[in-house]
Image (spheres, grey):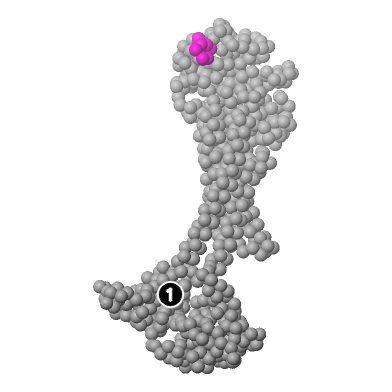
Amino acid sequence: MSEVIRVEGLFKTYRMGDVEVPALRGIDLTIERGEFVAVMGSSGSGKSTFMNVLGCLDRPTKGKYYLDGEEVGSLSADAWAHIRNKRIGFVFQGFNLLSRTTALENVELPMMYNGFASKDRHARAVEVLSLVGLAERHDHTPNRLSGGQQQRVAIARALVNKPSLILADEPTGNLDTVTSNDIMALFQKLNAEQGITIILVTHEADIAEHAKRQIVFRDGQMVSDHPNQQVIARLEA
Amino acid sequence: MQWLMTFRIALRALARNKLRAFLTMLGIIIGVGAVIAMVAIGEGAKSTIRAQIASLGTNVLVVLPGSNVQGGVRGGFGNVNTLVDSDGRAMTRELPSVAFASPVLRRQDQVVAGNLNWGTLVQGVAPEFQQIRDWQVSTGRYLHDGDMESAAKVAVIGQTVARQLFGNDDPLDGVIRIRNIPFRIVGTLVPKGQTGQGTDQDDTIMIPYTTMQKRLMRITWVQSIVVRAINAERVQEAQEQITLLLRQRHRIGSDREDDFNVRNLSDIAEAAQSTARVMAVLLGSVAGISLLVGGIGIMNIMLVSVTERTREIGIRMAVGARSRDIMLQFLVEAVVMAATGGLIGIVLGIGSSEVLKEWAQWPTLVRPEIVAIAFLFSGAVGIFFGFYPAKKAASLDPIDALRYE
């Protein structure tokens, strides 16, 4: 296995007026290709900040961040945009789809920013939509889709450029239990069948149970990191 | 990202909110439409005014013989007799800027018809004088070339003379006597009214200049030559060409002064030009203001739109849009709105000026360069007023934008 993510001595400090608020205090972590990691912790534990840094949305105050072996923490904003486009797929709690835009167009969106030909774009969007089980609903706008379906569209959008990893920030936070389990099953399937690396942020223990590895944050530090034997055992069986 | 893609993204974003896009465009539509219609009305009015002023004689020049100096006494203009009728013919023949030229001889004389007499201005002129003064005959005919060659004793009289000498009778074919020489009346002129100086223009008699020279004044030269330039713009050019031509014809060496004097009705011409200028400035500023208001409308909506679409901007950034892509998208949206509004405005402006022409009989003139300028200006307004909102959108932080409710 090759490593997708390696962070070394990561610090992030926010400045609020005269007060310095530490959000991350020295994180060291390596994530291999094909892992399914749940990042847990209460609010204010630094897990969201950590995800923003991993997603090339926020700059670390100190420390190194290697993505696919390349140091990316100090790249320019435009280089970050390119990385977010090609190598990272985001799934958010609030789905974050463009309203009044069809499912297909939402999925095509990331490809519009890297010069895909219109025909290829369309074919690829159709392909990933069927991968998430939404082959029938191409031309539906988000307000005509259920929460679970919207999240599937968002997952399809995250997958469309074949990223190195998917960052999912509370992806089930707005969904009921049954739908949550469906979405988590989809993540597991994508992880198992497509070998996609997934990092999932959640504060719910039963959601984290779906991951193969669980990491707990508290006060900006990683306090626990252990494999989820149950899932691994089931997968191996 | 390619331009085409940006364009498509912007079009899609606009299509998602058609009503608002249209309302935003309305400012530009009305602005451009008003500019084109107003300028068309202004141009129509200007050409009407120009025609009216031209009939007053803005493009008319008068060539007078120079003054002579004898023993320190400087005579007035017309005291030398170097100017001849062939000078006038040479002008029409050789100068492209000259449309017509006619010799004019003038004298106040007592005119007798039957038992009535009347003191009036007798003018010896060529047939071209009619075109120069743009003066139609009311009855009968004007003087013609045959009258000139034979120095015929014929006359065309103004309305005041006709009334004074013939009352209500038809003066045509009547006989008047000037210095005991009988003249047959061949035509009457339409009334022209007073000049600005209070002279009654209708109080005049016109006879062939040759008759005037030979029978009334016994001279061979002419007192003046009136010239009509092709148009008001070429008066200056005509003046210069006439000066050159006459210096040549009169064999005036470079060390000697002109023995003639070319004058134009510059007062009227200048007044006309400054009227046109004031009009242009007025319409231009109204044009600018209305487009400015339209532009502010665009900026206003774009700013609202950026705030409202903060989340969309965040999503786009998260999936890989660079600041530049966002900036371009909003800029293109603004320009597309402004340019589309401009196009609709052009159609509206041309349409309404046509309607005015057809139904209100108001002369309008749509000038293509104004249409082009209005369109380009509306595009520029889009760029100018779209720039700040676009900049604002592009400088959003993706994390904040995604979190925006």
Is residue A19 highlighted in magenta? Answer: yes
Q: Residue furthest top?
A: A223
The answer to whether A8 is drawn above or below residue B39 in the figure is: above
Where is mark 1, residue-wise?
Answer: B62
Rendering coords of residue B270 (x, y %):
47, 63
Rendering coords of residue B291 (x, y %): 57, 46
Q: Is residue B324 visible?
A: yes
Does B324 sit above or below residue B70? above
Chain holding disc 1: B
B175 relative to A79 in the view: left or right: right
Figure quadrant of residue B4: top right
Q: Between residue B180 and residue B221, name the one nearer to us.
A: B180
Q: Is residue B212 above or below residue B374?
A: below
User: Residue sitting at 46 percent across and 78 percent down?
Assistant: B100
Residue B119 appears at what percent x and percent y? 53, 83
The image position of residue B78, as x and y in percent, is 38, 78
Q: Amino acid at mark 1?
A: Val
Q: Quadrant of the C terminus of chain B?
A: top right
Seen from the viewer's position, the closer of residues B348 and B143 is B143
Residue at (53, 42) in percent of width and height: B383
Which residue is rendered at x = 66% and y = 40% of the image?
B20
Query: Label 1: how many residues lie within 10 Å, few (<14), some (14-19) or many (20+)?
Result: some
Residue drawn at point x = 57 percent, y = 66 percent: B48
- Looking at the rendering, the stretch of residues picked out in magenta corresponds to A16-25
Regarding residue A89, the answer to whether it shows in the image is: no
In the rendered image, residue A195 lying in the magenta stretch gets the answer: no
